[in-house]
Image: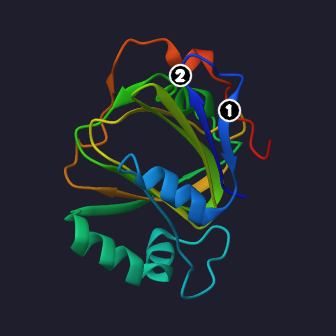
Amino acid sequence: MSRLRIFADDAPDTPLLVSQDGDEIARELDRIGVTFERWQANRPVAPGASQDEVIAAYQADIDRLIAERGFNTVDVISIAPDNPKKDELRAKFLEEHFHKEDEVRFFVAGSGLFTLHVDDRVYEIECVRNDLIGVPDGTTHWFDMGDEPNFVAIRFFEQPDGWVGHFTGSDIASKFPRYQAGS
């Protein structure tokens, strides 16, 4: 189940808010300009489905988002626990960074943890199947797929290099717990 926890950025052990209610998560994230939606496939998506099959199952929502936000590229990424590069892939975005375009991800299967640092608050969002998150460009954050990553996600891009991380050099991400799926 999706979960939002909000912390003061200097108190990683004491959440100010914990919610698993999708409407409340969307409202809280909207206050900081972050999009949170839940989508349903228009047809079943079997494990191991091709990129084209995954995209076809969510085509109406994808088309709406492209029209609203001007994305030029959509793809599907799949990471499984047996991926030989899982540790390298996990480490890539574990430190605080930002992007020069919105980071928009839709979870077709599995889960991951987006943690946003906005002003003096940290917003930890566990995204699971059917969750879409849209993090505005310039928002500092980190992403943790866990030590046994297992997810399929649709990614949206404006420019081919838009997902490049620009790291802040802050150690804040190391002060907050790493992701343990389902905890």
Q: For mark 2, what is the residue?
A: 9
> Which disc number belongs to residue 110?
none
**Farthest front residue?**
16
The quarter of the displayed image where residue 48 is located: bottom right
* Residue at the disc numbered 1: 15
Quarter of the picture holding the C terminus = top right
**Image quadrant where residue 99 sits:** top left
Residue 137 point in image, percent of width and height: 27, 42
Q: Where residue 174 sits: x, y (%)?
A: 58, 16
Choose the circle earlier in sequence order: 2 or 1.
Answer: 2
Q: Quadrant of the N terminus?
A: bottom right
Residue at position x 65%, y 51% in the image: 111
Could you tell me how far apart the alpha carbons at marks 2 and 1 are, in whole angstroms? 10 Å
Q: Residue furthest right?
A: 183
Q: Decide which of 76, 12 is in the foreground and name it.
A: 12
One can see residue 153 in this view: no
Instruction: State the SS at label 1.
Output: strand
Q: Position of residue 108 (x, y in %)?
A: 58, 65
Q: Is residue 14 left or right of residue 76?
A: right
Identified by mark 1, the residue type is Pro
Q: Position of residue 7 (x, y in %)?
A: 59, 30
Quarter location, residue 167 = top left
Relative to residue 88, is residue 6 depicted above or below?
Answer: below
Task: Say which residue appears at 45% left-offset and 25% top-offset.
Answer: 120
The amino acid beneath tag 2 is Asp
Would you call the spot at circle 2 few (<14 residues within 10 Å), some (14-19), or many (20 or more)?
some
Q: Are marks 2 and 1 in contact (CB under 8 Å)?
A: no
Q: Nearer the viewer, residue 49 or 103?
A: 103
Q: What residue is at 51 percent from the left and 52 percent from the top?
A: 28
Q: Secondary structure at mark 2?
A: loop
Colour style of the rendered protein structure: rainbow
